[in-house]
Amino acid sequence: MAQTPSPFDSDAALAGLVDDFEHGIAPEGGFSHRAHLAVALAYLDRYGEEGAIEHMRTGLLRFLELALGDPTAARVKYRETMTVFWVRLLAAGLAGTDPALPLHRRIAPLLERYGHASVIRSYYSQERLESDEARTRYLEPDLRPLPTT
């Protein structure tokens, strides 16, 4: 089976992206959806599911606060449901990869499969995803369940 090309040529390049994320530095061209997923996958590999959720939450809120210049506005824009959804979806995918491979090679097929932000719309109705409740706590998908690990 052919390997999907990775947007990262090494685990060091992936680690650099994570470091930039943790310091609020966006890559040239902005922090794409795929870049967010790559960071979440690196966190999953390093910290497990719950640790990845916490690190993504903290990092996303920091990025929003820097971009918006206001912690309150950052909290309004942030969606807990989206963060937890993506980490759990990626956790299920990462569990099916070969741990003997370098991480940047393990995540390449997942970035290809889930690299479009619209994937979430096959799990959630717009009303549920954009609700005030989805902003403050995790809501289970209402259209179909997440895959399990």
Image (tube, rainbow, N blue to C red):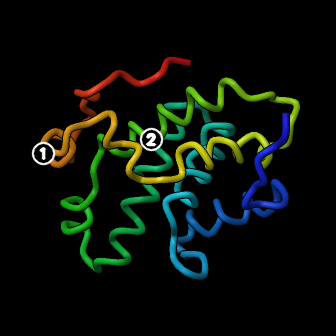
Q: CA distance from mark 1 to mark 2?
A: 17 Å
Q: Is residue 15 visible?
A: no
Residue type at numbered disc 2: Trp
Q: Secondary structure at mark 2?
A: helix
Point 82% across, 43% down: residue: 3
Q: At 22% across and 27% down in the image, what residue appears?
A: 142
**Other residues around mark 2 within 10 Å, as few (<14) / some (14–19) / many (≥20):** many
Left or right of 146 in this view: 140: left
Question: Residue 97 in the image: x percent, y percent?
Answer: 73, 29
Residue 139 horizontal side relative to residue 132, left or right: right
Q: Which residue is mark 2?
A: 86
Under tag 1, what secondary structure? loop
Say which quarter of the image contains residue 26: bottom right
Few, some or many residues within 10 Å of mark 1 (<14, 14–19, 20+)? few
Question: Disc 1 marks which residue?
Answer: 131
Q: Nearer the viewer, residue 66 or 35?
A: 35
Q: Position of residue 58 (x, y in %)?
A: 43, 54
Q: Which mark is residue 111?
A: none
| Residue found at the far front of this picture | 1
- Give left or right: position of 117 versus 98: left
Q: Residue at x 56, y 65 (%)?
A: 21
- Decide: marks 1, 2 in contact (CB < 8 A)? no
Q: Amino acid at mark 1?
A: Ser
